[in-house]
Image (cartoon, grey):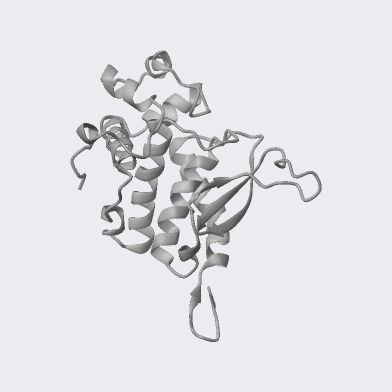
Amino acid sequence: MAVTSAAIPDFTSEYTRLVPEILEQAQSLYGKKVKKWEFNEICYEPDGPYLSYPESNTTGHPIEYKVNITLHSGAKTSYDEGIFQLSHEVIHLLSPNGDNETNNLEEGLAVYFSKVYTEEKTKNLKIFHTPTPYTGYLYAYNMVAELLKHDKNAVLKVRTIKKKFDKPKKKHFKKAGVVADKSLIAGLLETFERIRPVEDKPDPVS
C-alpha cells in the first residue's frame, strides 16, 4: 500500500497483486476460466465497478481477448470496498463475453463469492448489507445461495460441462448431476436485471 504526503492511503498496487490470488481461489471453487480471455489491468472510474475491454491506441477497436477490471474511483482509498468490488469482478474473469450482459447464475455467484471473500479477508461483516437500489443483485444472490446450500459444488459441476456462464441450459444441470428445483434453475438462467420488479424483491439474507 502506498501513502501520499497527505497520508491518504492508496490500495491500487495491492489490488493488482491480489488479482491472481483471488482468481486462483475462484477457479478452485467454480472451475477454470476460459483460456482465450486474459486479464489486462485494473482501471478506476466514477461509474465502476464493471468489466471493460481495452481499446487499441492505433485502431480504436477493442484489443482481442483482453479484459480490464474497472473499480469505482473511491476504491483506491477504501480497502474493504475495493476488496468487495474486486472479488466480485474476478468471478466475471472466469467467462468474459465481450459485453456486460450476464445471467442470474453468474451475477449471483459474483455477489456470493465477494461476500465470502471480503468477510474472510477484511472481517467486515456489514459491507454486504449496505443498502442498494439495485435489487437484482440480492435476487440473484439468493438463488445462488440456495443452489450452493444443497450442493456446494453445483457451479463447478455445471461449468465442467459448459464453461461459459451464458451457455448452460436446464439439461446441463441434470447432466452434471445437480439436483435443484426446476424453477430455481430457470431463474438462474434468466438474464440478470439490476433492478427487479417490486414483487420480486427477496427478503434480506443474513
- Apparent side of residue 8 relative to residue 13 in the rendered image (left or right): left
- Apparent side of residue 110 relative to residue 21 in the rendered image (left or right): left
**Up-down: is 147 above or below 77?**
above
**Up-down: is 176 above or below 150?**
above
Residue most extreme to the right: 58
Residue most extreme to the front: 197
Percent across and percent down for residue 146 are 26, 33
Which of the two residues, 140 or 22, is positioned nearer the viewer here? 140
Q: Residue drawn 27% across and 20% down? A: 183
Percent across and percent down for residue 3 are 53, 80
Q: Residue drawn 58% across and 56% down? A: 42
Residue most extreme to the left: 203
Q: Residue drawn 43% across and 24% down? A: 158
**Up-down: is 61 above or below 40?**
above
**Up-down: is 81 above or below 62?**
below
**Occupied quadrant, residue 154:** top left
Q: Residue drawn 52% across and 27% down? A: 163
Label count reads 0
**Occupied quadrant, residue 66:** top right
Percent across and percent down for residue 124 are 30, 62
Percent across and percent down for residue 62 are 70, 41
- Apparent side of residue 9 relative to residue 201 in the rendered image (left or right): right
